[in-house]
Image (cartoon, rainbow, N blue to C red):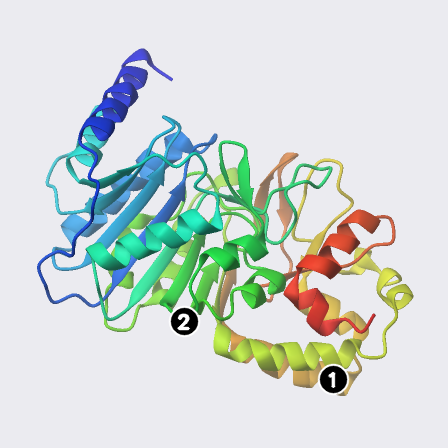
Amino acid sequence: MKIKGIIAILLLSLCWFSCSNEHISPDEPETSNRTVLVYMLANNNLNRYAYTNLKSMVEGYTSNKLDKENLLVYLASSTGSSALIDIKSDETVFTSDFDIYTYLSNHTVKQYNYSNSADPQTMQEIIADVKTHAPSPSYGLILWSHGTGWLSSDYKIQLRSFGPDGSNYLEIDELAAGLPDQLFDFIMFDACYMASIECVYELRNKADYILSSPTETMGDGWPYAQIIPCFFTPEAQLQTAASIFYNYYNAQSGAMQTATVSLVKTAMLNEVMQQTKAILSDKTSTDIYNVDRSQLQRMDYLSGSPGLLYDYDDYIKALATDEQYTQFQSALQAAVVYEAHTETAFFGSPQRSYAINRSCGLTVYVPQQNYPVMNAWYESRISWSKTVYPY
């Protein structure tokens, strides 16, 4: 990082500490369709992308004249400080990092001293502050950081679930514990691998819709300047946001032409679960281990891994009768209301693009006999596993 960037970060950190607000009080009542919180865990190697994305959010908010809408960002940054920022219109052209640092300082409503923002209790406290500062008839949530779906943070390939803040991570069940039931109209993940059946089922009571990617997403993130207005219409235009994301990256070239995305209606997941449970009801662990994974669409590529995440539809098709599969597909199509994927997807380890020949919009873990620790975690911590497998 350039020296002036480091100086700017230090100045911002000092300003945040000196301008810290001890209490949050509600703003004056205004007509607002929705309050949207961006929970940004950027105390990691994504920090530089955070500021680029924040600029894009401000630009989208300002250019679309969303002054009466509530867009707040909780930023846990690499400075070691964290703050709640109220995004407001600003005509500043962000020509340097210092411009966005100054903007964030000017619009900070509360400074925090949390040592770990990847913590369920911290999330609960931040969400409570947001509700106090910007009460609204409805709420949306954007979760921004690294992600590997449900896969545990202590797995030997060093996969992570969501985060980190420094060295702290949220497992998927901990993330669910940090979010209140029935509060959010939608949850959007700007994070890799969060569109898995295990994740969306774990979060089924947290939001009406979940917008996420079944594979990796580029560090550049979602095109916020274009999608921000989608979140503030009376009924959030989530499918439009998803298609903007897909089209933005599909128009790129080379490795940057990569995007997989799905929109899940959580109310439909119970029927998906019932159909899956019926298909698996007479299956043994040996039956599962014997699934020919070479015939399934693989959705993860990580150095040292033989494959952990596969297309959910492919997996069920390998186990179901024709009649069962037809019923399952009907349920799945009712739950996954939008899906799009580029012909290839880029993966960072090893760095290359792989073909995505088919995608239903959700991944699934296919239990493997040579991963007993992973299987034990899956069976004991993941609601989906505990619900659909008979053994």
Q: Is residue 110 left or right of residue 308?
A: left
Instruction: Tell me the quarter of the image containing the C terminus.
Output: bottom right
Rounded to the nearest whole Å, what is the CA distance between mark 2 and mark 1? 31 Å
Q: Nearer the viewer, residue 144 or 133?
A: 133
Circle 1: residue type: Gln
Give coordinates of residue 103: x percent, y percent. Answer: 18, 34
Q: Is residue 227 visible?
A: no
Give coordinates of residue 273: x percent, y percent. Answer: 64, 76
Q: Nearer the viewer, residue 215 or 122?
A: 122
Q: Residues within 10 Å of mark 1 (few under 14, many from 20)?
A: some
Q: Is residue 41 visible?
A: yes
Q: Quick one: SS at disc 1?
A: helix
First along the sequence among labels 2 and 1: 2
Q: Is residue 80 left or right of residue 173?
A: left
Is residue 236 placed above or below 244 in the rendered structure? below
Circle 2: residue type: Gln
Give coordinates of residue 76: x percent, y percent. Answer: 37, 37
Question: Which residue bears the numbered disc 1?
Answer: 324
Residue at 64 percent across and 46 percent down: it is 354
Residue at 78 percent across and 54 percent down: it is 376
Q: Name the front one of labels 2 and 1.
A: 2
Is residue 49 placed above or below 8 in the rendered structure? below
Q: Is residue 109 left or right of residue 143?
A: left
Q: Nearer the viewer, residue 382 or 321?
A: 382
Name which quarter of the figure residue 48 lies in. Answer: top left
Q: Quick one: SS at disc 2?
A: loop
Question: Which residue bears the numbered disc 2?
Answer: 182
